[in-house]
Each structure stands twice: as C-alpha cells, then as structure tokens.
Amino acid sequence: MLGLGPSEFAVLRRLDTPEKIQAFLFGLKQNFEPDGDTCRSVRAVLRLRRAHCIEGATLAACALWIHGERPLLLDLQAVHDYDHVVALFRRNGRWGAISKTNGAVLRFRDPVYRTLRELAMSYFHEYCNRLHQKTLRRYSRPFDLRRLDPADWAASKDGNWKLADALDATHHYRLVSPAQARALTRRDPFERRATSRLQYPAPRNSSARGRRKKR
C-alpha cells in the first residue's frame, strides 16, 4: 500500500519502537538543501540518508504506521523563524514526540505529556531564532498521514509538498496571547552559548532561504 520496495520496507520494519526510530533519525545527516528547497518523501530520505525536520517526521510516522500505530504529525508554527514538525506517539495515555533536528533542544520527547498543548509547551522556552527571541506561537491538531496518498509522501522519487501545504492548512491553536508574546524575554548569554552546538556543522555556503518546516 505504501509503494515502497522490499529493502525500503525492511529498514522501517526494523524500527519497531519510538526509541529505535529516533536513533535512526539521529544517524541521518542533516539536509542543508544545497540545491534548493526540499520536502523529501520517505523513499528519498532512505536513499539519500539525509533529512530535515518534516522529512524525518514523515519517515518516523511511516515507521509507526507499519507497526500498527497511527501515523500522526504535529506542526509547530513560529514567527520570524522556521516551523518544526514532529511525529506523535502515545504510551499509557500520554503523548511523546519523535524529532529530527540539528540543534540540541528540539529533539525527542518522552511520552509523559497529558495533552498536545503540554507537549508543544515543552518546546517553548528553547524555541528561539538567531536573535535569541522566543518564537514558538502555535501548534496544530494531529495530522494523520492517511489523509494523503502515500504515493506523494512515501513512495515518490523526490518531493511531497502536498503534505507541507496540508499541514499549513490544518487548524492551529495559539500558545500565548499577543500581550504575553510582547513580554517574552530573550535567552541570556549563558543559554545562548549552551544551546549553540549543532549535531552536523552547516556548510559554509548554507543559507536561511529555506521555505518552511526546516528546523
């Protein structure tokens, strides 16, 4: 049904827990998009062994689906910053998240959150742009990948921009009021130094021209 080949399916079949899926994503190199914007399918990620957040989250949700869980994504929207997408899973009635990101703070979340708002807020304090402003503003309803044709997001040779568009169109909930947003502080100098490390160094010619959902 996914349209993946036997070897592609076998890789995902081995990823039978959220922890194994997350470890696999950690092992993928960061997609810095040297040739322009990408929103790669599961097949393309498995072939190239590189991903940014929405690409990693899609692969994670696909692996969860293969193992009988709903393939759910959560979209985190920011201002003056990139959005971020994670794959959702539940254990004992609590939400957790699988995340592909190059930084140190917007990563895996253990399944301890009662609501999606709680989960989204766990990213709030560290979700900052290059000016050290806290930028996270909204989170989406869970987006079920079964709403879309797997030919677009799983088995296509290259992109799945239909998924990015559908995530943007999903209803989002506000995390802070305008008054609260105006009162937010910036990260202090120690926090800036502590969170500046990247898992994969960006190439010298890398730019921030990317379109969206690229944390």
Image (tube, rainbow, N blue to C red):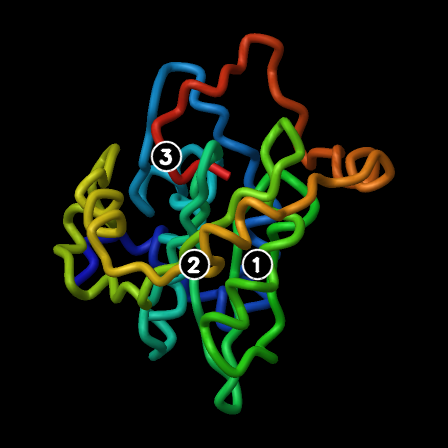
CA distance for labels 2 and 1: 8 Å
Would residue 50 appear left or right of 139 to someone viewing this image? right
**Secondary structure of residue under mark 1:** helix
Residue farthest toward the bottom in the current orientation of the protein: 92
Write down the residue under mark 1.
Answer: 22
Residue 192: x %, y % from top left = 78, 35
Can see residue 62?
Answer: no
Tell me where residue 138 sits by quadrant. Answer: bottom left
Q: Which residue is mark 3?
A: 212
- In the current view of this chain or complex, which residue is farthest to the right? 190
Q: CA distance from mark 3 to mark 1?
A: 22 Å
Q: Amino acid at mark 1?
A: Gln
State whether residue 28 is above or below residue 14.
above
Image quadrant in which the N terminus is located: bottom left
Q: Which mark is residue 59?
A: none
Q: Are marks 2 and 1 in contact (CB under 8 Å)?
A: yes
Foreground disc of the pair 3, 2: 3
Q: Is residue 106 left or right of residue 141?
A: right
Observer able to see residue 122: yes
**Residue 60 marker:** 2
Q: Answer yes or no: do the residues labelled 3 and 1 have beta carbons within 8 Å? A: no
Tell me what residue is drawn at x 69 percent, y 36 percent: 199
Q: Which residue is found at the position 33% from the left and 70% from the top?
A: 66
First reached walking from the N terminus: tag 2 or tag 1? 1
Q: Residue at x 38, y 15 (%)?
A: 35
SS assignment at label 3: loop
